[in-house]
Image (cartoon, grey):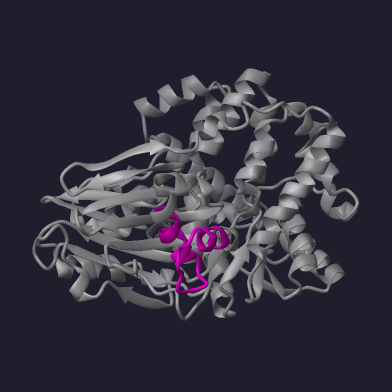
Amino acid sequence: MCGIALIVGNDADPALFRRMLESLTPRGDVQEELPEALRQIAGGPATGLLAGTQRLRIVDRERAVQPWVSPDEAWVLCYNGEIFNYRELRAELVAAGRELRSESDTEVVLEAFLEWGEAAVGKLRGEFAFAIVERATGRVFLARDPLGVKPLYWSRRGGRLHIASEVKALVPVGARVTEVPPGHHGWATAVTGPRLTPYVDLLRLGEDQVPIEDPDEAAKLVRAALQDSIRVRVDTDLTVGVIVSGGLDSSLTLLQVREMHPDCVAFTIGAPGSPDLDYARRLCRDLGVTHEVVELRPRDIGMGEIREAIRMGELSEYGDIINAVVSVPLFRRVHETGIKVVLTGDGSDELFGGYPMYHEVGPVAARRLFLHKIRNLCRTELQRVDRTSMGQGVEARVPFLDLALVELAMRMPLSLKMRNGREKWIVREAFADILPDYVRNRPKNPMSYSSGLHERARLYKPRFARVHHSFGYGLLEPLRRDFDHVLMKCGNDLDAAIRESAVRQDYTLLEHARDFAGALRWFTAARAPY
């Protein structure tokens, strides 16, 4: 994983580029830039292309230097992510006669593009975002993974195209920032900007497949798909961390990682005495897994922690910021232990019916809510995970969002996801033989609620918007009301919630006051034990 930054266009500003690249420093452990001899494009000035990365060295750590340049120096790649099937693709490329210089997935990305063109993106199984520059023309090919696990943004000003992994790197440009949508790719120039098209239609995934309605078949398929997804994500010689709350998804991830990659460590955050810590400690003790615990008291959260979560996360909804407040110290501990790769359980709730809203409406409306959740993961949960992990030099991998598993979930009716009053029923059934009863039967709790920290962070909500604006993140989008909150007020009517959000983006002063009062009452009552 990396942080990437590029400026394409005549007379690119080296000082601006340096600010862009340095803002991404936490995403890697080594800074690399395109040599001066290769910065000319389309026969123009010597500063037509500035490109660099903050590289987190994981695969072929010594040779996978970036920006990666083709042997004829015609193409330059800046790449953020991991390709989990790169060994298979490398074998195909070698069989096709291409000569490779490393054992890295970085080189495979560029060689695959040179061999198969734009169709290469459809062959990549992974979590990625990248830019490939054709030096002869100055054209740039952009691509992002189907779910948007890895970020990619661009802005254009003064006849130059600016590309980066985070919004904060583009704020100094002073122009509108635009996100490359998940599952899209296409060409861009400094003059026209990107023209992107989807290579995966996420919202129609699985429509041409037979629905899966038999519970036994569904359980076998879910088990096989998740195990394979975890297997490819622990294919490393490094120690692997697992973020564990003690809930179903993270516990299941830990169970599988321990079997496939015994060199693993679990990480949990929570307030002393919180359910998260109790469940996670019990599971790690039963499995004999090393367990790093971050105990955070509500009173430890102040305005400094809120500000850092907003700065690092770039998030645009209040609830995501509150969750980021908890994630920042968690991934800080991961970084302090020297672990670079972790797996998380994110995405399971969205896929397998972990939210009450899915079960409070009819099947058609539930399907629409499901698709809306999936489509927006890139700017909510996945953005929180990316920024708070990579913002501290940790690569977080999300096995529940492997495209094969997403497709399976889309082929299953809601009746397999919610049954006998239990959410994510099919996941529980698929692994019933290995899940401890105390995990299998544990009710779902949102992360920061069950860790006992949510209400403390809520005390500062009235100040979120001003801090968000101070960082310039409004160049992408302003801070908005939590869409789930709007949806609930609209009776889970998706169309009504979308209209309501468009009419009024932020909370009113009265809503902020009521929320603050509620949080204050809770915190005052709970203050003694914390």
Residue 266 drawn above or below residue 493: below
Q: Residue 523, can we see it?
A: yes
Point out residue 412 in the picture as x, y percentages from the top left corner. 72, 30
- The quarter holding residue 371 reads top right
- The quarter holding residue 308 reads bottom left
Whether residue 315 sits left or right of residue 45 in the image: it is: right
Whether residue 241 sits left or right of residue 94 in the image: it is: right
Whether residue 411 sits left or right of residue 442 in the image: it is: left
Residue 152 drawn above or below residue 390: above
Looking at the image, which is closer to me, 392 or 38? 38
Question: Which quadrant is home to the C terminus?
Answer: bottom right
Magenta-colored stretch includes residue 480: no
Q: Residue 509, can we see it?
A: no
Magenta stretch, residue numbers:
90-113
Point out residue 374 in the picture as x, y percentages from the top left corner. 55, 38
* Identity of the residue drawn at 83% across and 74% down: 288
* Identity of the residue drawn at 44% across and 66% down: 107
Looking at the image, which is closer to me, 256 or 315? 256
Point out residue 19 in the picture as x, y percentages from the top left corner. 24, 68
Point out residue 473 in the picture as x, y percentages from the top left corner. 31, 51
Residue 286 drawn above or below residue 187: below
* Identity of the residue drawn at 47% across and 70% down: 392
Q: What secondary structure is the magenta-colored segment mainly?
A: helix
